[in-house]
């Protein structure tokens, strides 16, 4: 890593940690969005605390990557890039961070130590389940779960063990699917948990099959958010809980038509590094779920709770083990590492939001 990146990374770390420690706990209120007749216009108005917020995707990225027309060439380019990125980087991530490829959930009142990061990732799962109203001892424990964008199956195995449920995971990366299955087999979960390479936008499952539909940090990769949400709803059984934890851009103000050019520029750089299509706001996800008549829709901004994550990832990349492992991977992973400070910048500038969104499919 060159000195420019290294020094900027370190200054990002200290700034982020300072602001993280100084800020008090902040959870934004549940988002309520009025549905517009055409969700793709993304001109919903949010009425909470007297605010009206209009949401829209970053149009330049959308145009660049053909998000809405989703033609075969663009889709093929994106899917190939995602598959290769995770084929290449998953071993390195597992080696340093373990089997959960998602942010940790941190207590804003406690300075995170290195050993806290793994438990913070588990806490992310537990807090998400709590937010969605799935308690440990409830009679409505899920029996059949789909893990959409499963990585190497950390959530699938965790949820299967917790609930004694069957779980099916899908990913675009063949290496992830193979590793996820090997870990499940090694943990004696081979008869309950299975993984396959499949597209979240065309899931290989029947309608109404799962009573928990789980998507932990995969939504940001989806080039067509409406189709993505549609598929999550389609495979959910009546009464099922649907959970989407994902990166969003900030909700727009009523006076705004789109993000500011410099905000789009930052997101575009992140898109290039992590194989992401255009971003959307949390309000747009809520609007999509409302348009499909989902019930008990809730969303929250958890950006404050994940603040120590990227500084920790950068620190781990700057260790001897991190650097040597990184150099052994490939260009896609190295490019991803260089983009990590941009994520911190995005969160600090309130452009990026870490969103949790849940709902229930009507009985
Ligand atoms: C950041 S990882 C998250 C992994 C996992 N959910 C976890 O928390 O450990 C993103 C995952 O989304 C998957 N993904 C991205 N686009 C996908 C698509 N269109 N269909 C299926 N999986 C997809 C990737 O293959 C990868 O496994």
Image (tube, grey):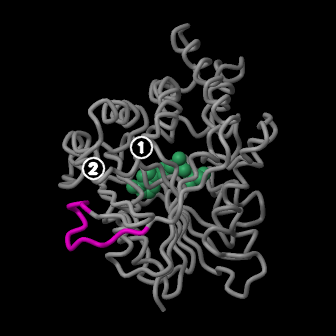
Rendering coords of residue 140 (x, y %): 67, 85
Give the crowd class for mark 1: few <14, some 14-19, many >=20 residues within 10 Å. Answer: many
Give the vertical position of 119 relative to 322 (above or below).
below
The N terminus: image quadrant: top right
Query: Given the current orientation, which residue lies at the most extreme top position?
Result: 3
| Some atom of ligand 1 lies within 8 Å of the CB belonging to the residue at label 2 | no
Secondary element at image label 1? helix
Give the vertical position of 313 relative to 299 (above or below).
above
Q: CA distance from mark 2 to mark 1?
A: 11 Å
Majority SS type along the magenta span: loop
Image quadrant where residue 36 sits: bottom left
Does residue 13 appear left or right of residue 320 in this picture?
Answer: left
Secondary element at image label 2? helix
| Some atom of ligand 1 lies within 8 Å of the CB belonging to the residue at label 1 | yes
Image quadrant where residue 195 sits: bottom right
Image quadrant where residue 142 sits: bottom right
Give the residues drawn in magenta, as a range.
Answer: 32-43
- Magenta-span inclusion, residue 34: yes
Q: Looking at the image, which residue is at 71% across and 46% down? A: 106
Q: Looking at the image, which residue is at 75% across and 45% down? A: 118
Does residue 303 appear left or right of residue 270 in this picture?
Answer: right
Q: Looking at the image, which residue is at 31% across and 36% down? A: 264
Contact (Cβ within 8 Å) of mark 2 with mark 1: no
To which residue does mark 2 refer? 75
Give the vertical position of 91 relative to 57 (above or below).
above
Does residue 116 appear left or right of residue 84 in this picture?
Answer: right
To which residue does mark 1 refer? 82
């Amino acid at each position: 890593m060159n000195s420019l990146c290294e020094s900027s990374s370190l200054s990002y770390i200290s700034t982020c940690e300072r602001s993280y420690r100084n800020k008090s706990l902040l959870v934004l209120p549940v988002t309520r969005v009025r549905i517009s007749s055409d969700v793709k216009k993304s001109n919903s108005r949010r009425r909470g605390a007297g605010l009206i917020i209009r949401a829209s995707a970053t149009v330049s990225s959308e145009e660049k990557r053909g998000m809405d027309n989703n033609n075969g060439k663009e889709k093929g380019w994106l899917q190939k890039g995602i598959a290769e990125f995770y084929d290449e980087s998953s071993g390195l991530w597992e080696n340093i961070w373990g089997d959960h490829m998602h942010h940790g959930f941190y207590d804003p009142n406690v300075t995170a130590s290195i050993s806290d990061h793994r438990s913070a990732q588990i806490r992310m799962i537990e807090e998400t389940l709590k937010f969605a109203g799935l308690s440990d001892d409830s009679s409505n424990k899920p029996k059949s779960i789909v893990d959409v964008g499963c990585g190497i199956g950390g959530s699938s195995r965790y949820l299967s063990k917790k609930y004694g449920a069957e779980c099916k995971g899908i990913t675009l990366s063949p290496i992830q699917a193979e590793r996820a299955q090997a870990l499940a087999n090694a943990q004696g979960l081979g008869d309950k948990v299975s993984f396959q390479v499949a597209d979240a936008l065309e899931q290989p499952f029947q309608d109404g099959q799962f009573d928990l539909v789980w998507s932990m940090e995969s939504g940001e990769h989806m080039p067509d958010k409406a189709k993505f949400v549609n598929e999550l709803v389609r495979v959910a059984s009546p009464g099922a809980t649907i959970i989407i934890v994902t990166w969003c851009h900030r909700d727009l103000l009523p006076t705004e038509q789109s993000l500011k050019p410099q905000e789009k520029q930052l997101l575009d750089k992140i898109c290039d590094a992590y194989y992401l299509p255009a971003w959307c706001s949390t309000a747009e996800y809520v609007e999509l779920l409302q348009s499909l008549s989902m019930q008990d829709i809730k969303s929250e901004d958890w950006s404050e709770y994940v603040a120590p994550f990227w500084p920790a990832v950068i620190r781990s990349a700057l260790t001897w083990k991190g650097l040597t492992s990184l150099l052994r991977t490939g260009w896609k992973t190295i490019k991803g590492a260089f983009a990590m400070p941009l994520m911190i910048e995005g969160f600090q500038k309130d452009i990026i939001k870490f969103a949790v969104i849940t709902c229930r499919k009507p009985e």
